[in-house]
Image (cartoon, helix red, strand yellow):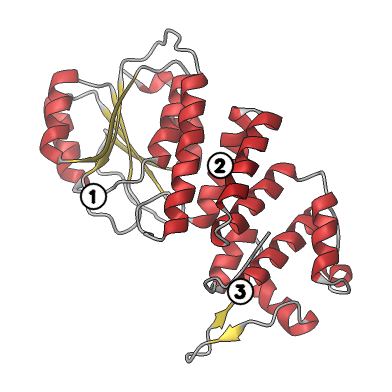
Amino acid sequence: MPIGKMRQFSIKELERFSNIKAHTIRIWENRYAVFKPQRNANNIRNYSLNDVKLLLNISLLLEDGARISQLTKLGAAEIERKAMDSGKTMPLKIVHTLIVCMYSNNFYEFEHALDNCVNTFGIDTTIQKVLIPFLEKVDILSYKDSRHEVHFAVTAVRKKLITGIESIKIRPGTANVSLLFLPKGEHYDLLLLYMTYVMKGKGIPILYLGTNIPIENLQQVILEMKPANLFTYLPANFHFDIPEFANFLRRNIPKAQLFIAEPEYMVRKPTGRNTRFFYYRDIATVAEPYTAY
């Protein structure tokens, strides 16, 4: 894949991409000279996309049982060849391919990898094992990155999520309607689409209100539709008056439950008996028909 001149990456990004701790990466640098990052004026490590690619290949081979002491004796090309030949970690390999393709602006290969994944594993496995892990690793579940490569990746992933949603046949459910929305100011609906995919598969009736919904519009819909459950996603540092909104629900629909997905590094306390926070990777567990009244 063509790499070209790309932006630099922090060691925390490498950790998130590969699931290898930053401390371990530093040890590898000092002991084996695996990477030679540049340092800025503040002596902070900056890594290239080639470094990212090498680390991802190493992490795949470690999953297959290789040892870092063995891998460091090989060149980057040999490590890549061995990683490509590895067959035990195919979904993870595709996730890594998507990361490199996105940051190298290789958009054709990005979509080609997604299409091959769907054709090989089906849309369900693609969504659960590839798309959601990819979104977690590159951290684009929320609107906070305006670069063109992010927009492209979001658009490509949205298309696959919508394909997955449309592939599910509607079947009768036992729950009352669930309202899905994002508050005003939040535009990326990837997680909301994933919720829709999971809940539709469970037979839960859904009202997909969409993104960037002003509070007065949201309240009007709630009063008219009286949903049993409401699902939303709030990223870090996003302002939404949860206690006030929860009080509105208690006054008007006492039995309604508000479910709020959030990143795993956030810890919020419930604001009342009708509000529940959960990590977005637990959507499949939370979105059960029995949660409705």
Mark yes or no: residue 140 visible: no
| Amino acid bearing label 1 | Gly
Determine the residue located farthest toward the bottom in the rendered image.
41
Mark 1 to mark 3 CA distance (whole Å): 33 Å
Q: Which residue is painted at 35% across and 58% down in the image?
A: 144
In the picture, measured across the screen, residue 62 lies left or right of residue 245, that is right
- Upstream in sequence: badge 1 or badge 3: 3
Q: Is residue 120 above or below residue 265?
A: above
**Split into 4 quadrants, where in the image is the C terminus?**
top left
Helix, strand or loop for disc 2: helix
Mark with earlier residue (1, 2): 2
The residue tagged 1 is 185
Q: Which residue is mark 3?
A: 48
Residue hosting label 2: 131
Q: In this picture, is 154 found above or below 12?
A: above
> What residue is drawn where x is 30% and y is 18%?
177
Give the residue type at disc 2.
Answer: Leu
| Badge 1 element | loop
Identity of the residue drawn at 42% across and 41% down: 190
